[in-house]
Amino acid sequence: MTLRESAPMEDSRARMLNPLQLAYIGDGVWELLVRSRLIYMGRGARHVHKDAVARVNAHAQSEAFRRIEAILTEEEADVARRGRNAHAHHAAPKNQDAADYRAATALEALIGYLYLTGQEERLLTLFKCSQEVENHAQE
């Protein structure tokens, strides 16, 4: 069972999507993963939103991307590179660093690609790896 409405997208079709389309869906998937993780961690409803906002922003996502960048496959690195180099029709939000924003877009594009192509196991592996530093800080 999956959240996808239809069968996973073929890799060739997913690679033809604009990286900003991949980042758009990846942003939603990333937020769902973060919120789910917070609930599983036992965070109260009052704190979940605040904690999620702290983890779903350009800086936090760029840090998460840096934690997994070295373990990406060549194919994943290519998708992330396309996301990083994509030109949005708007500047990074004024409270976000442009380099962080590009790295966050790389992460979101990668997450979107893995989700759309049905690579949930790999997506969850990368998500877990991206959170490991945070896990040790909470112990």
Image (cartoon, rainbow, N blue to C red):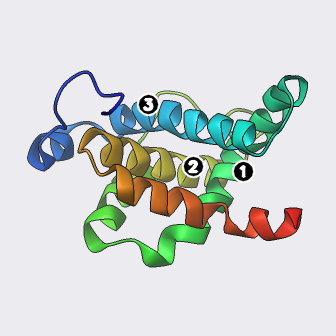
Q: What residue type is labelled 3?
A: Tyr
- N-terminal-most mark, 1 or 2: 1
Image quadrant occupied by the C terminus: bottom right
- N-terminal-most mark, 2 or 3: 3
Looking at the picture, how far across and down is residue 46, in whole percent?
89, 23
Quadrant position of residue 22? top left
Q: Name the residue under label 2.
A: 104
Q: In the figure, 25 relative to 123: above or below?
A: above
Q: How far apart are marks 1 and 2 (CA)?
A: 7 Å
Image quadrant occupied by the N terminus: top left
Q: For mark 2, give the secondary structure.
A: helix
Q: For mark 1, give the secondary structure.
A: helix
Q: Mark 1 points at which residue?
A: 59
Q: Which residue is drawn at 54% across and 56% down?
A: 127
Marks 1/2 in contact by CB < 8 Å: the verdict is: yes
Give 38 or 13, whichever is nearer the viewer.
38
